[in-house]
Image (cartoon, helix red, strand yellow):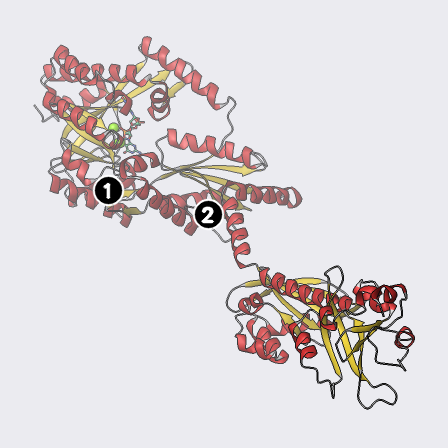
Amino acid sequence: MSSALRRSTPYVVATLPPPPAPPWMAVLEGLPLAAWVVALADRSVVAANAQACALLGRPLAELLDAPAASLLATPEDLSYWEGLDEQAPASLHSQALLCAGDGRLLHVERCIRPVTAPGAAAASHLLVSLRDRSAEQQAGDDRETAAAELRATLEATADGILVTDLAGRIRSFNHRFAQLWNMPESLLEVRDDAKVHDWMRRSVDDPEAYQRRLAAVQDAALLSSSEQLRLHAGQVLERVSRPLWQRGRPAGRVYSFRDLTRQLAADRRIEQLSTTDGLTGLPNRSRLSERVLEAAAQSRRAGEAFALMLIDLDRFRQINDSLGHGVGDEVLRTAAQRIQGCLRHSDDIARVGGDQFAVLLPGADSATAETLARRVLTAVAQPSHVDGAQFTLTCSIGVALCPQHGRTLDDLVRHAEAAMREVKDAGRGNFRLHQPRVEDDLRQHMRLDHAMRQALVSGRFRLNYQPQVDLASGRVVGSEALIRWRDPELGDVSPARFIPVAEETGFIIAIGDWVLSQAMRQATLWKERGTPMPIAVNVSALQFQQINFIDRVASMLAVSGLPPHLLELELTESILVRHADEALRRLQALSRLGLRLSIDDFGTGYSSLAYLKRFPIDKLKIDRSFVRGLPDDESDAGIVRAILQMARALGKQVIAEGVETEPQRAFLQAEGCAQFQGFLFSAPLDSLSFEQRLLRRGGAAVG
Ligand code: C2E
Ligand code: MG
Ligand code: MG
């Protein structure tokens, strides 16, 4: 049969053996599957049904006569066809890949059966039937891909994941899960649910609560929940549990575990940083502000008063400048501890500024505040030893009361600050309760400044002289000039009040100049009268730092004709520690002039042994705050002894100031102090009284 003929008739079968040819096409069309028939003799397709044509995407004409092997795609199939035993072909049921007309590969399930024509001895044909599994294959592939994607996603998340069924059996997990729970891989590989659960239970801080809550979570199959678990090892895990749905029904739970440890620590640190001071670990101003608001609310509700105490370290800047920030930090920490040690349980302390602390005293009236303030003053003034430096730290305390002085932190701080300033002005190292003034501080300040200038031009300043006494002989060996001011409007104004104002405005230079010349004039007079008496003059830091200070002193000495050894300059420790090199040059120049130099208020500043050794200082004046506690206060006694010892070692003279009692005097004498000054012997006297009482009796012994 020609091929043209074959093509024109769709169901003609090629190279069929002689009749009776089986009606292949009719047989095939009846089948529900794609099927074709292959002649065993030459393995070419002799018939194919419409499904086969559709499946393979080829017209029948193309299929007929085509070699069966050409429809295949895998080498395995090829070898099947090649190895076919014509005599006894085997049935074959297999998965195969076929090549569609458009080049697509088709996944099929293929069944090949030998067909024996009726009456024939052996099989002459093979019936090939196919079931297309491409769609299923695709779905399977998709499933595999989805599973792989899921796996990769699981492993890529930073959370530990555990999936269980409703009975709590473990379905899957990721490695992060094992890592978070510090679980051996072996436990998970075996997937022994009981052991895994047991491990988790035993790892948490409170296994019973854990178990209880887990059971509650498992019971509520439809709900999501979240909670924090604390592990023995210290970590905190957040467990989020969500239902796992399958075909619209809950089928299990997905637990995700997140390590919150670092985040919580960071949160805590941030919270701490925002409410505490890094250096001392004390709460800071914002924290205190909250507490004050609470206390104020409580005070409104219950009518309970409270006090706010502001504590400012005296001369702290000098420590920082002279001894360095390391020492400064240590001093702040020490002060914080000492103050804290004085407080009651209910009191709140905060660091509110560089060297300032504030304490909230709930329920405190002025008497309680006073008791606590005294306690703080004493504690802070314990001798300090930091980094080889020894000194006494003092503080000035201002107290404000709620509700008298206000109800907000700002109001109270303002009032406490004003009180604290007053303490500083009055010589530091004390406390004061704020007494609201009629005028505000600034106006007061300006008024004082103005009045001071008037006083100088109107000659209202006077000098008083306080005798300095030799302890061994009881003779007056010197005097200190102390300025006095009686104002027609303000009355007697203490130098403790106006000198700091003059120092601030710079007017101290004019005052200092006047004091120096007046004192020199007096000393010259006494000398000329045959009763020479050394006079010590207080010199402010600002005055000392004036460029022409030394020339000024030298020319005044020359003009007055005063022998320089009858003049002593009282300097403060701050002069030594600030700009030490320049100070040294000036002190040497002054010393060369022949006058004497002493350090006033010694012990309250921060001059070290090294300074004292270098500087040409003749005399140390032990501050009266250390004399006050003599002889009973051990700390004061210890400090005074130490100063005396040190002075002996350095060859300096020592005078104690503020001696008011006989036991104080006796202690000083017993400890080898050479001189004293104080009310015990005499208060400062005007020049006339000084002359009458001391000079005419022949008390002066210095020539
Ligand atoms: P200061 O130099 O330490 O003077 C000693 C102060 O202690 C004087 O106070 C004196 O009156 C007082 N005083 C003396 N004996 C006793 C005593 O036994 N007990 C007590 N509690 N106090 C005693 P004053 O005169 O009020 O002076 C206070 C401060 O004012 C002086 O302290 C000094 O720093 C400053 N000052 C006084 N006059 C001058 C001056 O002319 N120039 C300068 N720059 N400052 C002066
Ligand atoms: Mg003095
Ligand atoms: Mg003094």
* Ligand 1 in which quarter: top left
Percent x, y of residue 467: 20, 28
Whether residue 529 appears in this view of the structure is no
Q: Can you give x and y, in whole percent of width and height, for residue 73 in the image?
A: 69, 69
Position of residue 77 measured from the top left corner of the image (x, y, whole percent) = 69, 75
Q: Nearer the viewer, mark 1 or mark 2?
A: 2
Task: State which tag comes first along the sequence, 1 or 2.
Answer: 2
User: In the depicted view, which residue is nearer to us: 659 or 208?
Assistant: 208
Q: Amino acid at mark 2?
A: Leu
Bin the neighbour count of mark 1 within 10 Å (Cα to Cα): few under 14, some 14-19, many 20 and up. Answer: many
Q: Is residue 109 left or right of residue 593?
A: right
The quadrant of the picture occupied by the C terminus is top left
Above or below, comparing residue 512 to residue 136 in the picture: above
In which quadrant will I find the N terminus? bottom right
Q: Residue at x 43, y 49 (%)?
A: 340
Which numbered dot is residue 595? none
Q: Residue furthest left?
A: 703
Could you say where residue 212 lies in the image, as x and y percent from the top left?
67, 73
Give the amino acid type for the residue marked by disc 1 in the picture: Gln
Quadrant assignment, res 673 = top left
Picture residue at 89% right of the left edge, 63% below the top: 8
Viewer-closest of 569 and 690: 569
The residue identified by callout 2 is 282
Identify whether 98 is placed above or below 684: below
What whole-number distance in Å separates the C-alpha atoms at marks 1 and 2?
A: 39 Å
Density class for disc 2 (Cα within 10 Å; few <14, some 14-19, many ≥20) is many
User: Which label number is shown at residue 664?
Assistant: 1
For mark 1, give the secondary structure.
helix
Q: Residue furthest front?
A: 2
Marks 1 and 2: CB-CB under 8 Å?
no
Is 150 above or below relative to 517? below
